[in-house]
Amino acid sequence: MVEYPSNALDQIFAAVADPTRRTILDVLARGPAKVTEIARPFPVSLNAVSKHIKILERAGLIRREVVGRVHYCHLEPRALQRATTWLEHHRRFWEARLDALERHVAAKRKRDQRGGRQTGPTVHTLSRRS
């Protein structure tokens, strides 16, 4: 497993927990944008959007470039890759355990049916999201 400082992942997950910040990341996924362009569609002040941008910067999700008086923001996808790697590791971990549980339940059901015993409530299958 790839280890990352928990503080870095905490900042990334805290940053993407907010829908406004996720929208900002979606905007920047299309290319760099001025802070004023990013703020325009939001029903909050420029100062409020600026605070969201600072949180995204601290998490390493975006980079700000200042050209004169204009601030441009750029997406930094490497930080998202760190979170994706962490999530993928845990997805594989739990998927393997759920698969094992599903095999166990199916084997128990077969044994119980062969023995003619009545089992409790039927567990059809464990479903998981792909």
Image (spheres, rainbow, N blue to C red):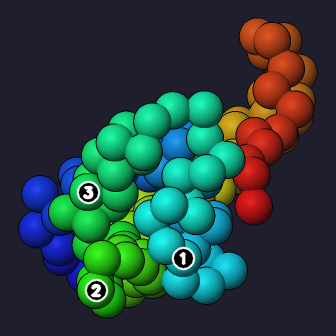
Q: What is the secondary structure assignment of the residue under circle 3?
A: helix
Viewer-proximal residue among 27 and 123: 27
For label 3, the residue is: 54
Viewer-proximal residue among 114 and 107: 107
Q: Earlier in the sequence, mark 2 or mark 3?
A: 3
Q: Quadrant of the C terminus?
A: bottom right
Measured along the vertical axis of the image, is residue 92 above or below residue 120?
Answer: below
Residue type highlighted by circle 3: Lys
Q: Position of residue 122 (x, y in %)?
A: 85, 20
Is label 1 or label 3 in front?
Answer: 1
Q: What is the secondary structure assignment of the residue under circle 1?
A: strand
Q: Earlier in the sequence, mark 1 or mark 3?
A: 1
**Based on the displayed image, in which of its 4 quarters is residue 3 positioned?**
bottom left
**Based on the displayed image, in which of its 4 quarters is residue 101 positioned?**
top right
Q: Position of residue 19 (x, y in %)?
A: 55, 41
For label 2, the residue is: 68
Instruction: Check disc 1: other Cα within 10 Å, few if <14, some if 14-19, many if 20+.
Output: some
Q: Position of residue 108 (x, y in %)?
A: 71, 37
Viewer-proximal residue among 106 and 7: 7
Residue placed furthest toward the front:
69
Q: Position of residue 120 (x, y in %)?
A: 76, 10
Is label 2 or label 3 in front?
Answer: 2
Residue 102 at least partly seen: yes
For label 1, the residue is: 33
Residue type highlighted by circle 2: Gly
Q: Residue at x 48, y 50 (%)?
A: 21
